[in-house]
Image (cartoon, grey):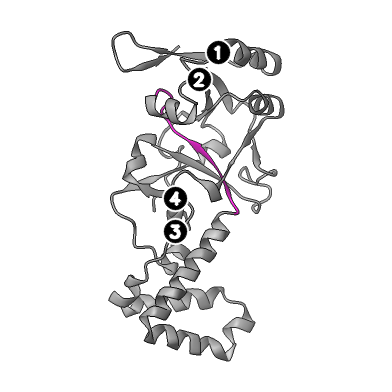
């Protein structure tokens, strides 16, 4: 299992980089809600779009039978008892082309289901030069600091980074569905990402979506960090109005070094 949580990792804080948008910052502070990103339009084209491995079925025919068992266990009675089901399975067993088509359809169906969820991306690194550049509009934005000692942020799940694409199969997805949304190419490892996955289901839990947002637990937002190239006054004005006791921290470039410090 790769879904190590922020609490299990012993983290005290997680951080979320974003550009400065007065409306968004006001919503966070006034309404205590955080906007979650649309998982169908991630900046990584593999994210939330897993592709099952059809070759694993050829290498080990037992994988194909386990795949059929997985689909049967989730099928409605009318599909499970339909006479054409066995014909379809036989066609897939006997034709590599049919197998590839079936696996491609299954991958698309799963991607569509996964993209019903929304995501809030976090990191334990508040001083990443690249993250400030990529996600906080060239250091002109902000970084939100969150306490981990609550159910929402404490349950944020760590992303696993790999050199090669995992050989996912439908039965693997049934056994460990989080692997499909917590595995990324090693190119992204500099982000050291943790993820909160919001869902329309799971009512009564911290990850239940309110539209496109999640509600913040009381006291979860512990500070706003202002980028080293940001215009401070408009950011400070909103914070003073809606959260006057919330600490404001500032990023500064360290003299004669490629390094940031926060004070």
Whether the magenta-drawn stretch holds residue 33 is answered as no
- Give how far apart the Cα atoms at labels 2 and 4 are: 26 Å
Label 3 sits on a secondary structure element that is loop
Pointers 1 and 2 in contact (CB under 8 A)? yes
Pointer 3 local density, CA inside 10 Å: few below 14, some 14–19, many at least 20: many
- Give how far apart the Cα atoms at labels 1 and 4 are: 33 Å
Q: Which mark is residue 231?
A: 1
Q: Which mark is residue 42?
A: none
Whether the magenta-drawn stretch holds residue 121 is answered as yes
- Nearer to us of marks 3 and 2 is 2
- Give how far apart the Cα atoms at labels 1 and 2 are: 7 Å
Residue 80 in view here: yes
Relative to 61, is 185 above or below? above
Q: Earlier in the sequence, mark 1 or mark 2?
A: 2
- Give how far apart the Cα atoms at labels 3 and 1 are: 40 Å
Which residue lies under the disc numbered 3?
Answer: 50
Label 1 sits on a secondary structure element that is loop
Residue 65 in view here: no
Q: Earlier in the sequence, mark 3 or mark 1?
A: 3
Relative to 258, is 15 above or below? below
The magenta segment: 116-127
Q: Residue at x 42, y 54 (%)?
A: 179
Pointers 3 and 2 in contact (CB under 8 A)? no
Q: Earlier in the sequence, mark 2 or mark 4?
A: 4
Which residue lies under the disc numbered 4?
Answer: 45
Q: Residue at x 28, y 75 (%)?
A: 59
Pointer 2 local density, CA inside 10 Å: few below 14, some 14–19, many at least 20: some
């Amino acid at each position: 299992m790769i879904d190590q949580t922020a609490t299990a990792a012993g983290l005290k804080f997680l951080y979320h980089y974003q550009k400065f948008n007065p409306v968004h910052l006001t919503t966070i502070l006034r309404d205590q809600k955080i906007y979650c990103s649309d998982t169908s339009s991630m900046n990584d084209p593999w994210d939330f779009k897993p592709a099952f491995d059809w070759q694993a079925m050829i290498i080990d025919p037992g994988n194909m039978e386990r795949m059929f068992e997985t689909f049967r266990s989730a099928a409605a009675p009318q599909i499970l008892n339909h006479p054409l089901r066995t014909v379809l399975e036989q066609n897939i067993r006997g034709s590599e082309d049919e197998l590839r088509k079936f696996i491609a359809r299954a991958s698309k169906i799963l991607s569509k289901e996964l993209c019903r969820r929304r995501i809030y991306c976090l990191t334990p690194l508040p001083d990443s030069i690249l993250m400030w550049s990529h996600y906080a509009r060239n250091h002109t934005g902000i970084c939100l600091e969150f306490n981990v000692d609550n159910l929402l942020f404490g349950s944020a799940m760590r992303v696993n980074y790999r050199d090669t694409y995992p050989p996912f199969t439908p039965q693997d997805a049934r056994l460990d569905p989080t692997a499909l949304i917590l595995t990324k190419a090693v190119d992204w490892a500099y982000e050291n990402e943790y993820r909160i996955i919001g869902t329309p289901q799971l009512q009564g839990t911290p990850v239940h979506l309110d539209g496109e947002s999640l509600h913040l637990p009381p006291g979860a937002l512990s500070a706003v960090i202002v980028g080293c190239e940001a215009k401070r006054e408009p950011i400070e004005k909103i914070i003073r109005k809606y959260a006057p006791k919330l600490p404001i921290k500032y990023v500064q470039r360290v003299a004669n070094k490629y390094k940031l410090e926060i004070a």
